[in-house]
Each structure stands twice: as structure tokens, then as C-alpha cells.
Image (cartoon, rainbow, N blue to C red):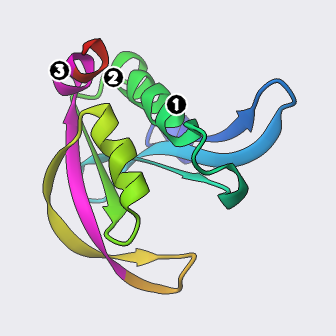
Amino acid sequence: NKRAAGTDFAFGILRQPDATYIGGCGVHLRENGEWEFGYWIGKPYWGNGYATEAGRRLAVFAFDELKIAILTAGWFVDNPASGRVIEKLGCVRTGTEERECRSRGHSVLCNTVTLTREQFRMKQAA
């Protein structure tokens, strides 16, 4: 179990107050040794701030509970809304790469970013 090993932490996203399941998020250790975080929200729930809230809670969990120094993430170039969420958290763009997209069944160009504890804290304090 990857969670028991401390390398993969997945969470459901529930809308309150009715506990409707609207998506998922998580933090996991990649094969290259980098910690990556991500999220997805069901289409009917887009535009309500759920991804931003999930991203913030993941960052707090990663930095405060797991004591991770640097997080990585990515957003597909054809999904600028996800890019805005990433920007709100304080992430800094590092480049682009092709990544497999399971839901599409093929690789997609992805913007890559990093987020340090300090960048996150500064952005949240602003």
C-alpha cells in the first residue's frame, strides 16, 4: 500500500453541506523523486472555487504534515482554468512536456510548475 509506505495520498473532494462527491485530489512521490500534487473536479462543478480550495488544502497537507520542501504539478495547455488555479497557489512555471492523459487515452502537452513552501505562504498572505 503506497499510502502506508508514505508515497501516495489520495483524497475525495466532497461538496458541503450535502457531502456530494465532486472530484479527487492527491500528493504522490514520482519515480524521479519529486513530489507531485494534482486534482480533478467533475465538469458540473467547475467554476466554483473547488479546485483552488483542494489545491490549497493539498499544499498545506504536503508542507505541514509531510514536511515536503518542493511540490511539482502540471496543467494541460488546453486547460487554462487549471493554470489559473495553479497560479493562485503561487506555483512557478518550469517548462512544458508531453504527459499521458488517461481520460483522453493519449499524451498531451503539459505546462510544468514547482511550488515551494515559501512561495505558497507568500501567495496566501498577499
Q: Position of residue 71 (x, y in %)?
A: 27, 39
Q: Is residue 93 magenta?
A: no
Q: In the current view of this chain or complex, which residue is farthest to the front?
A: 47
> Could you tell me if the residues under marks 2 and 1 are in contact, i.e. CB atoms within 8 Å?
no
Q: In the current view of this chain or complex, which residue is farthest to the left?
A: 94
Label 2 amino acid? Phe
Instruction: Give the image quarter of residue 91.
Output: top left
Q: Is residue 64 above or below residue 36?
A: above
Question: Could one spot residue 9 in this view of the protein?
Answer: no
Residue placed under numbered mark 1 in the picture: 53
**Numbered marks: total:** 3
For numbered disc 2, what is the local secondary structure? helix
Of callouts 2 and 1, the N-terminal one = 1
For numbered disc 3, what is the local secondary structure? helix
Residue placed under numbered mark 2 in the picture: 63
Cα distance between the residues tagged 2 and 1 = 15 Å
Cα distance between the residues tagged 3 and 1 = 18 Å
Residue occupying the point 38% across, 83% down: 107
Of callouts 3 and 2, the N-terminal one = 2
